[in-house]
Amino acid sequence: MPETQDSQDRAPPNHPSPIPDRGALPRHVAVIMDGNGRWAARRRRPRMIGHRAGARAVNLCIDFCLDRGIGALTLFAFSSENWGRPEEEVGALMKLFLNALEREVEELDRRGVRIRFIGERERFAGPIRERMDAAEASTRGNGRLHLAIAASYGGRQDVAAAARALATEVAAGRLRPEDIDERAVGARMALSDLPDPDLFIRTGGDLRISNFLLWQLAYTELWFTDILWPELDTATLERALADFAARERRFGLTGEQAGGFSNLPSDRAPE
Ligand code: IPE
Ligand code: IPE
Ligand code: MG
């Protein structure tokens, strides 16, 4: 159904969301899966062993979201900058990625997961690109969990691509410069059909965004843990959700005004 897909991809960021609001539960969780290399180094094993162990944590995280009824999960798997790592590591990661695509897609489809990839797909080798396209096509009709894998993704590249798309439309006479506003930019960014992430999680102990979803994280609640990605367990994810539920989101307003945005269940919400 390419028509439905196209119109969804072009939908403005604040159009009615396909994911219902569940109050204290984040609708969309975005994760930087970091710490694979250090996990392996602590065991005096090659970095690749850490990446392999990390693949297990990916499954745990997806299972958790399915279990808890979280509508969207975006996982940072490989950044635009990660191409600069030693050739051997990049090659091994590509192999792991291809294996995961071959192994996991069918089961995810069966469980109602819609898979998509964001990032510069043209940088991947043909067989990987084909698998990515096929995974998206076969799971397009699913809606239980929207799973986005950020692969060869960079937040700045995402912004630049949106700027390029806008400039192209202006040059073609289809758009006036004065019509370029937040909504017009947002509609051309990755994941524009999903609500912005409510909760961002980074494992591995570093307190930074590392060129992940720069635009989309504007008002996301940030949560960091020293746990290394391969050590991820359900208890850690439960902690992230509990902390999220206890936060008050103000979106630039006063605490009093923002009462309605609070993540707290209404009986605990501030007066
Ligand atoms: C995250 O783990 C996975 C990728 C970036 C592909 P790292 O490989 O960055 O692990 P650390 O940060 O070196 O421990
Ligand atoms: C971010 O981790 C990218 C992914 C997890 C895919 P990095 O390990 O690349 O980030 P830095 O280099 O520590 O900022
Ligand atoms: Mg890292």
Image: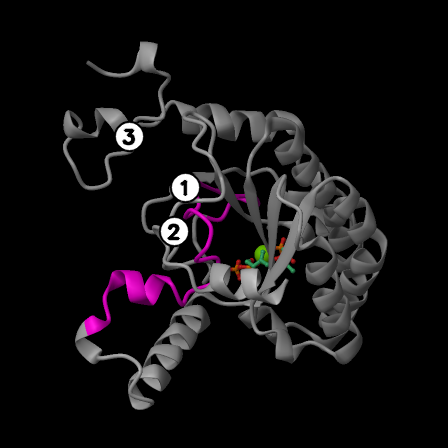
**Residue depth check, mark 3 versus mark 2: number of the one nearer the observer:** 3
Q: Tell me the quadrant of the picture where the N terminus can be found.
A: bottom right
Q: Position of residue 133 (x, y in %)?
A: 70, 68
- Quarter occupied by residue 221: top left
In the picture provided, is 188 more to the left or to the right than 68?
Answer: left
What whole-number distance in Å separates the C-alpha atoms at marks 3 and 2? 17 Å
Q: Position of residue 45 (x, y in %)?
A: 80, 53
Q: Which mark is residue 217?
A: 2
> Looking at the image, which residue sits at the far top?
267
Residue flagged by tag 3: what amino acid is it?
A: Phe
In the picture provided, is 122 more to the left or to the right than 135?
Answer: left
Can you identify the residue that label 1 sits on?
222
Can you identify the residue that label 3 sits on?
261
Do tag 1 and tag 2 residues touch (Cβ < 8 Å)?
Answer: yes
- Quarter occupied by residue 151: bottom right
Ligand 3 quarter of the rendering:
bottom right
Residue at the image position 30 percent from the left and 26 percent from the top: 262
Which residues, given as a range, are shown in magenta? Answer: 179-206
Label 1 environment density (alpha carbons within 10 Å; few <14, some 14–19, many ≥20): some
Q: Earlier in the sequence, mark 3 or mark 2?
A: 2
**Label 1 CB sits under 8 Å from any ligand 2 atom:** no
